[in-house]
């Protein structure tokens, strides 16, 4: 059997530039402008409107009261998690081929889709203080990546995301109340425990000094359809929407490499010691369990095939990588 990690070619496949890959590794984040088309954004905005007005009934959400005012609708919730498990449009957004094209290059070839979130953030609402997503969503090895897709123009006034430069290279800071919940508990000599991650008040949230350790945080202002990819260690935050009349809607999803072990199901119980079988494989393949899309959104997988092995040898004296270049192998490789 061999595994050549390559998604099927399809028209419109987005190809990541080497410089974009390098920027993501260096900065811990990457903005890809116009990744989603106007039509794609309209589909997700339609979903947001249908949910807001109660036209898309969702398990766990109370029906919208008859004659509800806009204020009442805005006060019901600012965000919804794991929407792809209930809504075909959210599953389509989570598995959007152009998003997965980028992920395949950044964390692939095998990509597991873990979470979808729809943020409404109407005027006066929303906001989340400094935090690191890989604290909340655990993957081993830790390969978590977030994708933040703007559905409205997102700017400083309506509460766009802010990122803390350099922090994509920081470890995950454990909270005092759950110190073992990091990617390598006990492996650091001076990793201090923090309190109140995600709290909007910087004086209370003790991740704040880490956010300024490498430079001043800055806003990521985006237009509808632009996507921000950021690694699970990058400290980021948002402020409440300060406008009087503009929503700040965003579709935000999380993924990891399909070979990471994922003991996470958004707090819901799962059987056994890993929840991989509950998450959808979007690209490549995996030796670990995975789910197929529930609503038949297309995915481009590459199951192992019979064929020549993709093994590569270390270079020989002349720099050649091929076995006939005078490299001696020790032992019987079949045993
Ligand atoms: O969009 C926001 O306001 C916060 C999103 C965020 O921090 C996250 O998804 O981790």
Image (cartoon, grey):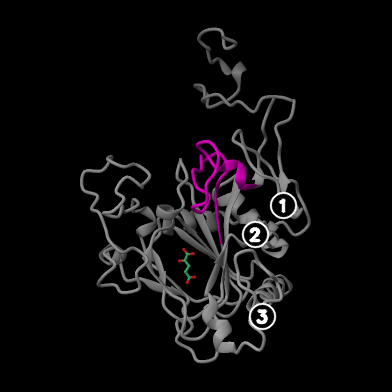
Please determine whether, in this image, residue 299 is positioned above or below residue 313: below
Which one is in front in this view, the residue at disc 2 or the one at disc 3? 3
Q: Is residue 286 above or below residue 106?
A: above
Residue at figure coordinates x 35%, y 59% from the top left: 167
Q: Position of residue 219 (x, y in %)?
A: 43, 75
Q: In the picture provided, is 153 more to the left or to the right than 234?
A: right
Q: Mark 1 or 3 closer to N-term? A: 3
Residue position for label 1: 294
Residue 30, image x, y percentages: 51, 62
Q: What residue is rendered at 63% in x and 41% in y?
A: 290
Image position of 260 (left or right of 207): right
Name the mark on residue 53: 3
Q: Which quadrant holds the C terminus?
A: top right
Q: Secondary structure at mark 2?
A: helix
- Label 2 to label 1: alpha-carbon separation: 9 Å
Region rendered in magenta: 253-280
Specify whether 27 is left or right of 1.
Answer: left
Up-down relation of residue 126 to residue 235 (above or below) = below
Label 1 crowd bin: few (<14), some (14–19), many (20+), radius 10 Å? few
Circle 2 Cα neighbour tier, 10 Å, few/some/many (<14 / 14–19 / ≥20): many
């Amino acid at each position: 059997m061999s595994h050549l990690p390559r998604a099927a070619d399809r028209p419109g496949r987005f190809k990541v530039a080497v410089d974009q890959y390098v920027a993501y590794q260096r900065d811990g984040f990457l903005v890809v402008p116009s990744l989603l088309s106007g039509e794609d954004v309209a589909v997700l905005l339609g979903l947001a409107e249908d949910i807001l007005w109660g036209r898309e009934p969702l398990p766990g959400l109370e029906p919208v009261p008859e004659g509800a005012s806009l204020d009442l609708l805005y006060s019901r919730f600012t965000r919804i998690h794991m929407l792809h498990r209930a809504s075909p449009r959210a599953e389509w957004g989570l598995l959007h081929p152009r998003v997965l094209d980028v992920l395949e290059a950044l964390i692939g070839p095998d990509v597991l889709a873990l979470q979808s979130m729809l943020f409404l953030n109407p005027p006066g609402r929303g906001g989340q203080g400094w935090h690191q997503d890989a604290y909340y969503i655990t993957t081993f090895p830790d390969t978590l990546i977030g994708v933040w897709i703007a559905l409205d123009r997102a700017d400083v006034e309506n509460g766009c995301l802010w990122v803390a430069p350099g922090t994509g290279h920081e470890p995950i800071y454990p909270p005092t109340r759950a110190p073992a919940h990091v990617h390598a508990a006990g492996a650091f000599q001076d990793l201090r425990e923090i309190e109140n991650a995600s709290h909007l008040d910087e004086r209370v949230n003790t991740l704040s000094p880490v956010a300024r350790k490498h430079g001043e945080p800055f806003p990521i202002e985006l237009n509808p359809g632009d996507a921000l990819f950021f690694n699970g260690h990058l400290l980021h935050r948002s402020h409440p929407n300060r406008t009087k009349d503009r929503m700040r809607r965003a579709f935000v999803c999380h993924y990891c490499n399909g070979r990471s072990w994922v003991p996470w199901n958004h707090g819901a119980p799962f059987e056994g010691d890993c929840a991989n079988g509950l998450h959808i494989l979007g690209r490549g393949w995996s030796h670990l369990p995975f789910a197929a899309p529930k609503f038949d959104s297309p995915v481009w997988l590459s199951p192992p095939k019979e064929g020549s092995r993709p093994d590569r040898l270390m270079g020989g004296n002349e720099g050649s990588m091929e076995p006939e270049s005078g490299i001696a192998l020790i032992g019987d490789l079949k045993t």
